[in-house]
Image: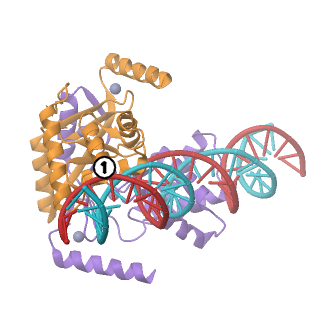
Chain colours: A purple, B orange, C cyan, D red
Amino acid sequence: MTPVKRPKEVDENFVKEKEAGFADFIQRKGLKTTRQRNTIISVFFRLRGHISVEELLNEVKKVNPRIGYATVYRTLHLLVESNLVEERRFGDGLARYEGHSDVEHHDHMICLECGEISEFFNPRLEALQEKLAEENNFEIFRHRLELYGVCKDKEACNKRKNSKAAEARGA
Amino acid sequence: MTPVKRPKEVDENFVKEKEAGFADFIQRKGLKTTRQRNTIISVFFRLRGHISVEELLNEVKKVNPRIGYATVYRTLHLLVESNLVEERRFGDGLARYEGHSDVEHHDHMICLECGEISEFFNPRLEALQEKLAEENNFEIFRHRLELYGVCKDKEACNKRKNSKAAEARGA
DNA sequence: GAAAGGGTTGCAATTGATTTGCGATTCGAT
DNA sequence: ATCGAATCGCAAATCAATTGCAACCCTTTC
Ligand SMILES: [Mn+2]
Ligand SMILES: [Mn+2]
Ligand SMILES: [Zn+2]
Ligand SMILES: [Zn+2]
């Protein structure tokens, strides 16, 4: 298994790259740079994990409280279209977004108890998928693999579950 | 690749098994057999493919026009809970349901052009997932793998796409 | 086989996420 | 600075799915 590791600190270089990529996209498309879009992507790429629209909006509002849902939704669509961000749906009914990290593509294991999401990438798995597609005369553009289950480390799992419950109460 | 094959004709034996399974579940749960539920499952298990709620309701209404959305939704939830049916979401925003066939579990390749959904099952792929989970100290309950792309056979793909477009116009 | 109790239905209203219409505002090429 | 086009913010609309509730139907009991 190759776990995907995310840097703990914000990687300013990564953010810069993403911002530049978005600027490119905007220009290519004949769209406009705006204060709001800049704020949103700057905030977004400094967050890590699988961010919901609400989470993002909350953070964005700390910078500019006048920005609303519609603009965040619209900007996220642009980010997805520009291929700088991927949309995820883990079955809790709301979309989540993540900027690619070093390992662009990866898959997920989701603990149904504590909600922990582990990211991984395995070349053999990817290759096998290609082989199966080949045999079926099919060309893969993208794929989605999610493993749902539970942590075997019950101790760690429970700890996470509890801290999550506490957080939910507090918020 | 092991393509999953579905019988072309309704397999009455399969339907019977499913109906019996549902009866069992209903009883175990202390729920009630009703005319509506019987109609819905009988219709559902005679359909094949990945059925949306609306599609199912349309068919159900041919038998009993008084049955409404709520009952179909509620019955589908029971079917999923009873493990006789799986819910799928292929990204078009609505849930689809399928009764298991001989090959209980399978994954999907979805053509973004013609909408064709190929079903397959590959033991190596399944085993590899288990191995990766093991390495991550994770226990898999279920998983979801979807390959999105296009048919390489452009002729067949276009034919399907066109017949689909015609159908949409006609309906 | 009638009555009782509890699950079920159908409908309409509600929810929750996401989208959209639109008047006001901002962008950016000229 | 100007002007047409793109964008914003808000509220209203949409869309799938869920739910409250009064009427109704099953099953068990007597
Ligand atoms: Mn991820
Ligand atoms: Mn299937
Ligand atoms: Zn866990
Ligand atoms: Zn195709």
* Foreground of the two, A171 or B51: B51
Nearest the viewer among A37 and B154 is: B154
Residue B1 visible somewhere in the drawing: no
Q: Position of residue B168 (x, y in %)?
A: 47, 26
Looking at the image, residue A117 sits to the left or right of residue A25; the answer is left
Which residue position holds label 1?
Answer: B76
Please give left or right for residue B124 compared with residue B68 in the image.
left
Q: Position of residue D17 (x, y in %)?
A: 41, 53
Along the line of sight, which residue is nearer the eye, C14 or B71? B71
Q: Is residue B155 above or below residue A166?
A: above
Residue D11, image quadrant? bottom right
Query: In the visual, does A129 lie left or right of A72?
Result: left
- The residue sitting at 25% across, 45% down in the picture is B145
Subunit that carries the residue with mark 1: B
- What residue is rendered at 14% in x and 46% in y? B20
Which residue is at a point 58% across and 60% down the rendered structure image? A69
- Mark 1 sits near ligand 2, with its Cβ under 8 Å away: no
The three-letter code of the residue at mark 1 reads Leu
**How busy is the neighbourhood of tag 1: few (under 14 within 10 Å), some, or many (20 plus)?**
many
Residue B95 in sight here:
yes
Picture mark count: 1
The relative height of residue B107 versus residue B2 in the rendered view (above or below) is: below
At horizontal 58% and vertical 39% (from top left) the residue drawn is A28
Ligand 4: give its quadrant.
top left
Residue A117, image x and y in percent?
A: 29, 64
Quarter placement of the N terminus of chain B? top left
Across and down, in percent, residue B141 comes to 17, 58
Q: In which quadrant of the rendered view does residue A149 lie?
A: bottom left
Question: At numbered mark 1, what does the secondary structure look like: helix, strand or loop?
Answer: helix
Occupied quadrant, residue B66:
top left
